[in-house]
Image (cartoon, rainbow, N blue to C red):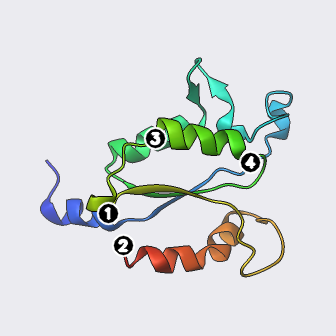
Amino acid sequence: MPRLDTIALLKTTLTMLLAGGQGERLYPLTRDRAKPAVPFGAIYRIIDFTLSNCVNSNLRRIYVLTQYKSSSLDRHLHLGWNIFNPELGEFLYTIPPQQQMSETWYRGTADAIYQNIISVKLSLTY
């Protein structure tokens, strides 16, 4: 059984998932969608594995950083992952490139986090 301080830590942990992959090796599956939105087993998407791990680990403050052809991913997250309770500080938000720190798309993992540092700071107020 988890200790109380571990549970409190998990409730305040911010999770950032990078879901902007172009998925060139999965072409033609990624012709019209980002790699995380590729269907798997009829109703699921590749991103569902990661989100399921987050929820089962009690990580319920999640930003999904999108980028490449993200409309089907946004739709799937909105319709299929509406299990979070904002009154408990839980959320799942998609964040497209904000270009607040530079005028380019994400140039890797560290740059994606850096370009969204404002979102990280704002999450401290939730």
**Amino acid, disc 2:** Tyr
Asked whether, in this view, residue 32 is left or right of residue 88, the answer is right
Name the residue at 34% across, 58% down. Answer: 86
34 to 3, vertically: above or below: above
Residue beneath label 4, please? 21
Q: Earlier in the sequence, mark 4 or mark 2?
A: 4
Say whether marks 1 and 2 touch (CB < 8 Å).
yes
Q: Earlier in the sequence, mark 3 or mark 4?
A: 4
- Give the total of numbered labels: 4
Which structural element holds mark 1?
A: loop
Q: Earlier in the sequence, mark 2 or mark 3?
A: 3
Residue beneath label 1, please? 89
Residue beneath label 2, please? 126
Residue 124, position in %: x, y? 40, 77
User: Callout 4: few (<14), some (14-19), or many (20+) C-alpha neighbours within 10 Å?
Assistant: some
Residue beneath label 3, please? 81
Q: CA distance from mark 3 to mark 4?
A: 20 Å
Which structural element holds mark 3?
A: loop
**Amino acid, disc 3:** Trp
Which structural element holds mark 2?
A: loop
**Amino acid, disc 1:** Gly
Residue 80, position in %: x, y? 49, 35
Q: CA distance from mark 3 to mark 1?
A: 16 Å
